[in-house]
Amino acid sequence: MSDLLKVTIDGKSIEVPPGTTIMQAARQLGGKYPPAMCYYEPLKNTGGKCRVCLVKVAQTSEANPRPMPKLVASCITRVEHGMVVENETSPEVLDARNGVVEFLLINHPLDCPVCDQAGECDLQNLSYEHGHEQTRYEEGRREFERIDIGPYVQLHMTRCILCYRCVYAADQLTGQRVHGVLNRGDVSEIGTYIQQSIENEFSGNIIDVCPVGALTDKTYRFKQRVWFSKPFDAHRDCDKCCGKVVLWMKGDAIIRVTARKNEFGEVTDFICNDCRFEHKQASDWSIEGPRDIIPESVIGANKYELPVVSPAVNVDAKFVSE
Amino acid sequence: MMQQAKTLTNRAKLMPRKPLTFSERIYLPAIFKGMGITLSHLFRKKATISYPDKVRPMSKVFRGLHVLKRDERGAERCTACGLCALACPAEAITMTAAERKPHEKQLYREEKYAAVYEINMLRCIFCGLCEEACPKAAIFLQNDVMAPPSFEREDFIYGKDRLVEPFQKN
């Protein structure tokens, strides 16, 4: 069983070890991989909830050439030898994905102009690609009483899509979790039991993990739109975490500190609250350089300049820009 | 006698010069003709208007001074989303957002509002892209007001005091 399994996704083949999911194989293959709202590779057991990663399996395996009867969630379905998967090439998949996005947006408020996540929101990107311009839903959206969950994290329950990522993050990173999903079905919501505040020193990571703007940074609240700040890689010596972060700067001021995300929008090195919330001085950090941003990103619409950190850096910046 | 100018190319056509006729030589018919044209202009419609007393009608699609609108309750519509500043090709718009306090619900429509909203009218090219970008129908370019002239640069930086539409009671 140690042999590699050959899987074909959208006409391109790759060989992967057994146990790999279709999503992981598609990501390794490059190109267009299925989107994910709930699946988060660094966190165990995530996935299978949001259904935006649905793909069509045209051939189950070499031994069983029949297609799978329904679309399957690519993030939790393991590949088999000779599997043929259709992702972007299948109109059925795209249609199903449009439907899933429409369902996700049923209760999601249209408050992107107010939301701090706008510009780096997975749901915003997804609905830009797959959503309709108009909603067909006539009933009111869900409303919740505002819960204060501590000094660092702002919870907007109306924006939550119940992906459970923050629950897994709290379980796997912090050891003791004080928040979770309360109630069931249509009225289920993220909350802390009897208004407890989330105070664990790695709790800030639930902000990065959240695909929408349900959990946002309170110290960054309404400070600046994402696309007016510029991301820089930086690090500091931290005894709790790796200390490798992204600083979002406006001029010389650090507006926000986040963990570094890879090309799939996933944090690989989680950072502690000390780095994230308490160090907002440029002198606290050694700045490595501007971060690569995707040209299509709204952050790329900004004019990119190096900040004035020290005279030596400034000279280099001039040299680079010329 | 004038010497014929040497041509650079042989494409120049030499035109025969006819001698003047009698009426051309006495010049008077041409002078009267010219005076007649001048006289006819006296009775034509004037191209100018006496400006401060009379004002020309503006085009309906004219893009003049910006205004930040209020909604039907009188609350400011702008939520400081920054899309106008992002769309602005001249980078004339800057803003600072703030969170609405519970007692300010009558003043601002959304949870977030623009505490500072400035447009530099010297930078602005009045293209109207901010108006197009606005998701809240908050900013409009008026078609009957232009930015007035001034001697000071500071006078052209319009803050919320001059941009927000005055509160009207129905």
Image: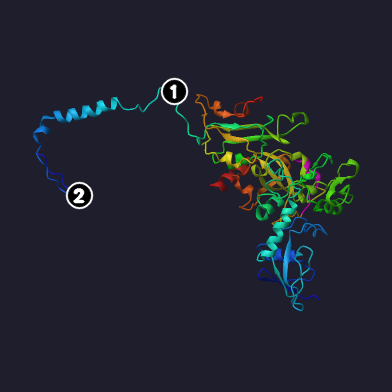
Residue pictured at 71% horizontal, 36% vertical: B110
Can the viewer see residue A282 in this picture? no
**To which chain does the residue with label 2 belong?**
B
Q: Find residue B8 and name its label.
A: 2
Q: What secondary structure is found at the residue carrying circle 1?
A: loop
Q: Is residue B112 above or below residue A289?
A: above
Could you tell which of marks 1 and 2 lies nearer the N-terminus? 2
Residue A132 lies, in percent from the top left, at 66, 52
- Is A112 in front, or is A166? A112
Residue pictured at 65% horizontal, 70% vertical: A11
Q: Quadrant of the N terminus of chain A?
A: bottom right
- Find out whether the residues at labels 1 and 2 contact each other: C-beta distance under 8 Å: no
Q: In which quadrant of the rendered view does residue A79 lie?
A: bottom right
Residue A61 in the magenta stretch? The answer is no
- State the separation of the CA atoms marked 1 and 2: 57 Å
On the image, numbered disc 1 is attached to which residue?
A: B54
Discs 1 and 2 lie in a common subunit: yes
Q: Residues within 10 Å of mark 1 (few under 14, many from 20)?
A: few
Chain part drawn in magenta: A269-279
User: Which one is in front in this view, the residue at disc 1 or the one at disc 2?
Assistant: 1
User: Three-letter amino acid code at disc 1?
Assistant: Lys
Residue A89 lies, in percent from the top left, at 65, 66
Extreme residue in the bottom direction: A63
Q: Is residue B116 above or below residue A85?
A: above
Q: In which quadrant of the rendered view does residue B68 lie?
A: top right
Residue A277 in the magenta stretch? The answer is yes
**To which chain does the residue with label 1 belong?**
B
- Is A241 in front, or is A61? A61
Extreme residue in the right direction: A194
User: Three-letter amino acid code at disc 2?
Assistant: Leu
Relative to residue A125, is residue A269 drawn left or right? right
